[in-house]
Image (cartoon, rainbow, N blue to C red):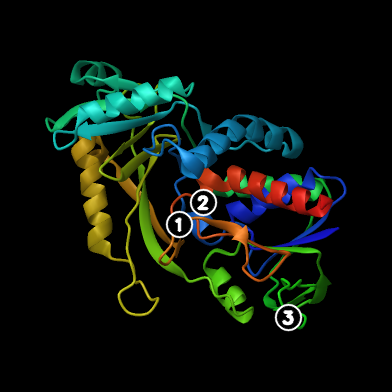
Amino acid sequence: MHVVIIGCGVVGAAIAYELSLIKELKITIIDRQPPAQASTGAALGVLMGVISHKIKGQPWQRRQTSIQRYETLIPELEAITGHKIPFNRQGILSLVSEQENLAQWENLAAIRHSQGWKLEVWDPAKLKNLCPQVHNPKIIGAVYSPQDRQLDPTALTLALVAAAQHHGVTCKFGVNVLGIDTPIQQIHQPSQCGLVQTTEGKIAAHWIVIAAGLGSTPLTAQLNQMLDVRPVLGQALQIHLNQPLANPHFQPVITGNDVHIVPIGGNNYWVGATVEFPHNGHEIPPNQELLTKVWHQAITFCPDLATGTIVRTWSGLRPRPENRPAPVIEKLPGFSNVILATGHYRNGVLLAPATANTIREMISYNSLQ
């Protein structure tokens, strides 16, 4: 049985790897670019699962599944590929400002405890003791999530691809998908697509998984079931300091007011990211003022960042579904063998393992019917 995956960002790569664990499947993954070139390559890789405010239903279950899977997935991939994936196990620290209600965090901590997870609510004295780099009188405390993580999205994606190839997955990069052949629609019956047309010829497929982010819109439009995925631009920057912020042995991700300060080793930190929506059409030129605002916000949290040097800035487009929740993980309406795994917006890296698990279950279940 042949599965064709269109799109090799972190989501497509995770699906390819997870499916490669099923020996009966033949898998091909296609992308017009090398892996992790679009939104994945611009992501910060902050895995806000336990510390998120999602507490029930699919949104929480997907986060929980992913956080659990990453603990086994990272060493698994490193063993197969021999490559180290930067994986910060020192947790996430969310700063609480005077505008926020600390009681809400206490309530979330209690819920997480009942679910078998840890969240710690810190008072200003504990915050000052453990993370003295945070110095702002408007910060009234913090919430520490020791089980949340951060990783390098590009290194992860490349490792997923290498491990999938090790298991026999065929990768076609620099190849464009021109369309998907659809047979004549049968009355009251879902259609089944059998061929993916590419610039390297036609590929026969039993299953087609569309994990193409913003590229999902034209593909689904061609099948007369257009999924409207719009771009949201994010900008970030990398800072180099002469020495690490405070304790070099305790370097969690610090987040506050939707700004992340991400330690990546070597006295380097990522800071981001902006959230910029298109105004006219789909064009979003990066707004330098917004990036400067994010940078200044990070400095108000950790003043020592101001001594650093900005060594690079970058941006990427996140795929956000219009008029529906993100992500979109379901069969394409009207088709029995086309699955959407796209539109993850700002949570592609976080939800990639759970998405891959869902796709594996869908294909396994339906293939047995």
Label 1 with label 2: CB-CB less than 8 Å: yes
Three-letter residue code for mark 2: Gly
Q: Where does the image place residue 44, in percent across and percent down from the top left?
A: 44, 47
Marker count (numbered): 3
Which of the labelled discs sits on residue 152, or is there none? none
Give how far apart the Cα atoms at labels 1 and 3 are.
32 Å
- Amino acid at circle 3: Gln
Q: Residues within 10 Å of mark 1 (few under 14, many from 20)?
A: many
Mark 1 near mark 3, Cβ–Cβ under 8 Å? no
Residue 65, compared with residue 191, is above or below; it is: above
Q: Residue at x 35, y 24 (%)?
A: 109
Task: Label 2: state its secondary structure.
Answer: helix
Distance from label 2 to label 3 (Cα)? 33 Å
Residue linked to disc 1: 345
Asked if residue 197 lies left or right of residue 297, the reply is right
Q: Position of residue 289 (x, y in %)?
A: 22, 61
Give the secondary structure at mark 3.
Answer: loop
Q: Is the N terminus in the top left, top right, bottom left or bottom right quadrant?
A: bottom right
Count residues near mark 3 (Cα–Cα under 10 Å), then give few for <14, some for 14-19, many for 20+: few
Q: Which residue is mark 3?
A: 185
Q: Are marks 2 and 3 in contact (CB under 8 Å)?
A: no
The residue that mark 2 highlights is 348
- Image position of 131 with respect to 28: above or below: above
Residue type at mark 1 is: Tyr
Among numbered discs 1 and 3, the one appearing first in the sequence: 3
- Residue at the extreme bottom: 184
